[in-house]
């Protein structure tokens, strides 16, 4: 048992922080977040080419670095801290994980290398509503001659309007099976639309499939086990979101404490008042506990991908992490605005950007409320 | 970063579990799960004889260095022992203050003859210790100690006069380590000595403090020229604060994993009751049970991080500084949750005059959790000042 980062892992975090300080300054974030694309292609090319991050947890055999999920989480934590605007999460945590979990060996060798080399991808599964597992799938697939025909509408698809590769989940027409399909996002019948959102640093899109025709070999793995696999993929991605939350919460705490030591009222730093100190202490308690929950979940995810832990353990760890980290990020950014006082409410100060990202990451892949409900079912209904 | 234990550690776990399973039977079956916080006066004689049994098995001081009679066990193995002990329902330890606090203090700061005199009594489960720090006017403001120690050169002894309070198990202990003011001109943390004081003597009176639980785990100790031989002062007589703080540092959280396991036992009892009496179907209670579950698991992960950081030199990690505030709040909330799950049944006593059930006792006793060992407010000061480097509180 060694529940702390290794020296190599600490170095990965430091390297990521240094690189992101350069390419994702707050001014860069503010410039890019108002564009429809939502990310800077030059930065994306450097993330792919120079840093190699898109190959982090892909096996070497398929063109990746063969590092683990823990290393990926460390990078995502730094991305959250720097509010990076990027299709990294969607391409790696959604598209790559789908291929890793659901794909056959030949599908892995076909797609993982492309995704590692910088083609972007995402996963569309939910037709909307507050459901964040396989029960949210409403789109339909039907086998016709030598093709599948896909029909349906998806909402809240991360970077869905720009992704090159699109994995879509659909239910069998007049059947119970669920399929995951890799389709080209530019093919006929795929209608993608940006859904402008409250948090401008992360992109959401709607995707509509109108009689999209896709070959039989585009279904990832076997349809029989796809629901279970989809849930595992979503749990892996959920842990990725929790990492973004921990990084952002840490930064919000740092900003609030720095502000409190700079701001003078009543002839003293406001950070010398217990009203502020105690609030900051509660913020830190949540940040550190969120980090513990995240790292635990990252270890379980790593074990799952190595075949050393099962999907039930993954589900529990992901729900614990997402429930706690969501509440923590919201609490910390909300408290940080309060510590900033009036300027915390302005467009000019950066804390509002974290507050909005806290809310959007809280909702995405299940709020604390939803995940607590999942855990209550595990605890009380079995 | 890895969560799993080595194979040899897992074998050690089996050894511990099977030893406990074998020994916690017969005369000792009735003390299983007993003697924890809120229940510390239960089965004192049996629990003292259990301490001797533990000692026979070589299970006291397993983390102590071999040269001082311990096993030099790794952090992992100490964790495993505490986990298995709690899992098996091992009774609340009467010897833990000597084992986890005084022993390490002596082999770190004490003289060879102090070690030779006092360590064997702890390791053999024969001599029990209590902690004499808090006073009526030195609670949160711990350095404001007024108990005074005057040196009598003719007899080469110190004479202690004053009062200590909130001393757990004082009436069952043989010795107390006492922080007292050796220099009457001094204030705060200067001019304090660290004394090893025998409790059975004319100058000492112990009075139990009856609590809201109806029980009396804590005591007051009154010193009226109580005697302490010069050789039983640890460190220089004016630098006892350093020893006293060093001692608190030894409580570095290994036993808190065992504590987490005890909390797990309590939480499981709440979950079973909720399933039995239908509370598990009430949406708000479901949410709070899930929240408690999340909180308890994360408590474990926090502790694991702290323990894994042990080999790092230097400051305590942030996760260590939040530990007390975190568990105290969690546990107090569990007490409230337990009562809400019990519903109206929670109102009835088990027996007169004031016998409480396990969950009622949990509810009332956890009001102390957020006060002793540094109140939540003091903990927040510590976190803000030490971890976040915010300005220190001014003194009045």
Image (cartoon, helix red, strand yellow):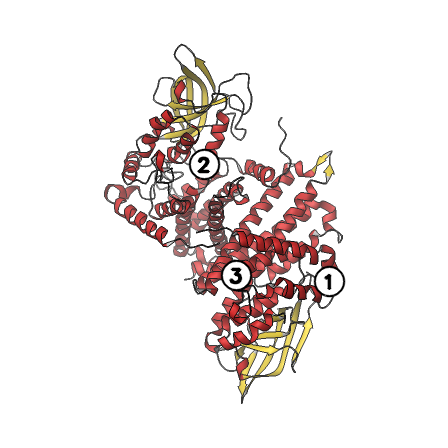
Local SS, label 2: helix
Front-most of residues B52 and B347: B52
- Residue occupying the far left of the picture: B26
Dot 1 alpha-carbon crowd within 10 angstroms: few under 14, some 14 to 19, many 20 or more: some
Q: Are marks 2 and 1 on the same chain?
A: no
Q: Which residue is mark 3?
A: A69
Residue A95 to residue B361: above or below: below
Q: Residue at x 37, y 28 (%)?
A: B115
Dot 3 alpha-carbon crowd within 10 angstroms: few under 14, some 14 to 19, many 20 or more: many
Residue A38 can be seen in this image: no
Q: Percent x, y for residue A44?
A: 67, 65
Local SS, label 3: helix
Dot 2 alpha-carbon crowd within 10 angstroms: few under 14, some 14 to 19, many 20 or more: some
Question: CA–CA distance between discs 3 and 2?
Answer: 35 Å
Q: Which residue is mark 1?
A: A32
Q: Residue at x 55, y 35 (%)?
A: B378
**Quadrant of the frame with the C terminus of chain B:** top right
Residue A62 to residue A16: above or below: below
Question: CA–CA distance between discs 2 and 1?
Answer: 51 Å
Q: Which residue is mark 2?
A: B250
């Amino acid at each position: 048992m060694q529940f702390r980062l290794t020296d190599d892992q600490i170095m990965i975090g430091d390297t990521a922080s240094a690189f992101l300080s350069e390419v994702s300054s707050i001014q860069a974030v503010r410039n890019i977040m108002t564009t429809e694309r939502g990310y800077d292609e030059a930065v994306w090319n450097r993330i792919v080419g120079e840093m190699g991050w898109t190959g982090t947890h892909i096996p070497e055999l398929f063109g990746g670095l063969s590092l683990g999920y823990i290393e990926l989480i460390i990078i995502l934590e730094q991305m959250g801290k720097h509010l990076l605007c990027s299709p990294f999460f969607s391409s790696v945590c959604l598209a790559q994980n789908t291929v890793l979990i659901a794909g056959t060996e030949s599908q892995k060798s076909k797609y993982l290398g492309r995704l590692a080399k910088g083609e972007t991808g995402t996963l569309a599964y939910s037709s909307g509503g507050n459901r964040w597992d396989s029960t949210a799938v409403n789109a339909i697939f039907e086998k016709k001659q030598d093709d599948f025909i896909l029909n349906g509408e998806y909402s809240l698809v991360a970077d869905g309007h720009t992704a090159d590769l699109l994995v879509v989940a659909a239910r069998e027409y007049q059947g119970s099976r669920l399929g995951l399909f890799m389709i080209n996002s530019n093919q006929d019948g795929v209608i993608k639309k940006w859904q402008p959102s409250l948090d401008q640093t992360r992109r959401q899109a709607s995707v509509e499939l109108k009689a999209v025709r896709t070959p039989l070999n585009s279904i990832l793995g076997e349809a029989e086990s796809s629901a279970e696999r989809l849930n595992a993929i979503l749990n892996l991605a959920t842990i990725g979101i929790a990492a973004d939350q921990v990084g952002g919460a840490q930064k919000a705490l740092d900003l609030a404490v720095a502000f409190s030591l700079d701001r003078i009222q009543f002839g003293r730093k406001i950070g010398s008042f217990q009203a502020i100190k105690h609030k900051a202490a509660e913020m830190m308690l949540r940040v550190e506990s969120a980090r513990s929950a995240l790292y635990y979940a990252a270890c379980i995810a790593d074990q799952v991908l190595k075949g050393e832990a099962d999907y039930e353990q993954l589900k529990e760890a992901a729900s614990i992490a997402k429930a706690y980290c969501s509440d923590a990020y919201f609490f910390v950014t909300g408290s940080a605005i309060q510590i900033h006082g009036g300027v915390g409410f302005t467009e000019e100060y950066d804390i509002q950007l974290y507050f909005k990202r806290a809310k959007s990451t809280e909702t995405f892949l299940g709020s604390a409320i939803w995940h607590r409900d999942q855990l209550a079912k595990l605890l009380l209904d079995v | 970063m890895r969560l799993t234990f080595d194979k040899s550690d897992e074998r050690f776990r089996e050894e511990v579990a099977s030893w406990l399973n074998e020994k916690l039977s017969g005369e000792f079956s009735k003390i299983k799960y007993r003697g924890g916080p809120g229940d510390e006066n239960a089965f004192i004689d049996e629990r003292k004889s259990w301490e001797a049994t533990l000692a026979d098995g070589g299970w006291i001081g397993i983390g102590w260095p071999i040269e001082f009679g311990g096993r030099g066990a790794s952090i992992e193995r100490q964790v495993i022992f505490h986990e298995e002990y709690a899992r098996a329902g091992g009774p609340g330890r009467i010897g833990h203050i000597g084992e986890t606090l005084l022993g390490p203090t002596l082999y770190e700061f004490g003289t060879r003859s102090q070690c030779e005199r006092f360590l064997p009594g702890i390791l053999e489960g024969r001599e029990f210790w209590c902690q004499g720090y808090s006073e009526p006017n030195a609670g949160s403001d711990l350095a404001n100690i007024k108990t005074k120690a005057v040196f009598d050169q003719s007899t080469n002894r110190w004479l202690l006069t004053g009062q200590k309070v909130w001393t757990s198990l004082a009436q069952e202990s043989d010795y107390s380590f006492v922080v007292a003011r050796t220099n009457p001109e001094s204030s705060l943390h200067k001019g304090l000595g660290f004394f090893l004081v025998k409790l059975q003597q004319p100058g000492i009176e112990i009075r139990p403090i009856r609590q809201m639980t109806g029980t009396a785990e804590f005591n007051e100790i009154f010193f009226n020229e109580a005697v302490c031989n010069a050789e039983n002062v640890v460190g220089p007589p004016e630098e006892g604060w350093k020893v006293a703080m060093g001692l608190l540092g030894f409580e570095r959280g290994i036993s808190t994993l065992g504590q987490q396991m005890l909390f797990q036992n309590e939480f499981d009892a709440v979950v079973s009751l909720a399933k039995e009496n239908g509370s598990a179907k009430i949406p708000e209670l479901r949410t709070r049970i899930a929240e408690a579950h999340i909180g308890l698991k994360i408590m474990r992960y926090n502790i694991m991080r702290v323990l894994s950081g042990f080999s790092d030199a230097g400051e305590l990690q942030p996760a260590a500084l939040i530990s007390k505030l975190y568990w105290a709040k969690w546990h107090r909330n569990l007490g409230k949750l337990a009562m809400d799950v019990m519903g109206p049944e929670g109102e009835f006593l088990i027996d007169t005059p004031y016998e409480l059930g396990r969950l009622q006792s949990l509810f009332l006793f956890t009001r102390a959790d957020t006060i002793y060992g540094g109140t939540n407010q003091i903990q927040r000061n510590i976190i803000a000042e030490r971890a976040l480097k915010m300005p220190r509180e001014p003194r009045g």
